[in-house]
Structures are given as C-alpha cells and as structure tokens.
Image (cartoon, grey):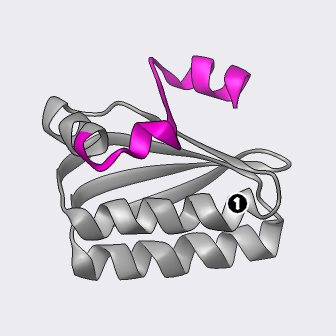
Amino acid sequence: MDVVIIKLDHDMIKVNLKGEIDHHASLILREEIDNYIEKHRVKKILFNFKDVSFMDSSGVGMIIGRYKKLQNVGGKIGVVNLAPKIERIFQMSGLFSLISNFNDEKEAIDKL
C-alpha cells in the first residue's frame, strides 16, 4: 500500500491510495493520516481510490475511525474513483450513510 497525502486547502487534504487496503496497510494509513491531521489541523479528507485494487473490513474500519476523528472537530470525509467492487463494500458496510461519494475531485472539493 502506497499513500500520498496532498494538502488542498488550509484544512483539507487528498489522500491518494494505491494497492491493497488490508489489516497491515490500514494500520499504516491510520497512523500517517492521524499524524497529518493533528499536525496540520485538517477538517476535511478526500480519499482517492483510483489505484486501489482491494479493500477488506479493516479498510472500512480505518475510514470509520478517520470519520469519527474528524466528526469531533466538525469535519467531513469524501471519496472519489471507487471501483465497482470497492463501491460494493462501501454500500454493504453502510459507509455511504457517513461519507459522500463524489463523481470527481472538483465536485468533492467544491462540496466538502
């Protein structure tokens, strides 16, 4: 799992994910994102799933954890570029009741 965090605005980041989001990758992602959130006072995260080939329940947990962390400061999370199999995981887990799925990055940046 590779992750690239890009600051988009004073309180918004984009997290470009690549590879498989399994238990091991989720732990690394959580730590890197949480460190960035605390250091830069982030309130909005856009997860870009363009290059994600697999995600299991630990990935769902990682996203829910970031949602809860940002919810405490009035923040929001969005996702873009979900492959059909990843989108199905989001639907089955109920993540779409917490997190917005956007058509593209521009829409996400405008609406988050």
Rendering coords of residue 100 (x, y %): 52, 32
Q: Which amino acid does the dot numbered 1 rest on?
A: Leu
Q: Which is more toward the observer, 76 or 19?
A: 76
Instruction: Give the residues in magenta.
Output: 92-112
Rendering coords of residue 70 (x, y %): 70, 60
Rendering coords of residue 82 (x, y %): 30, 33
Which quadrant holds residue 112?
top right
Left or right placement of residue 22 versus residue 41 in this view: left
The correct choice, above or below, for 32 with respect to 9 in the image is: below
Q: What residue is rendered at 40% in x and 80% in y?
A: 28
Which quadrant holds residue 103?
top left
Residue 102 is inside the magenta segment: yes
Which quadrant holds residue 25?
bottom left
Left or right placement of residue 106 versus residue 110 in this view: left
Left or right placement of residue 24 versus residue 7 in this view: left
The correct choice, above or below, for 5 with respect to 78 in the image is: below
- The residue pinned by badge 1 equals 70
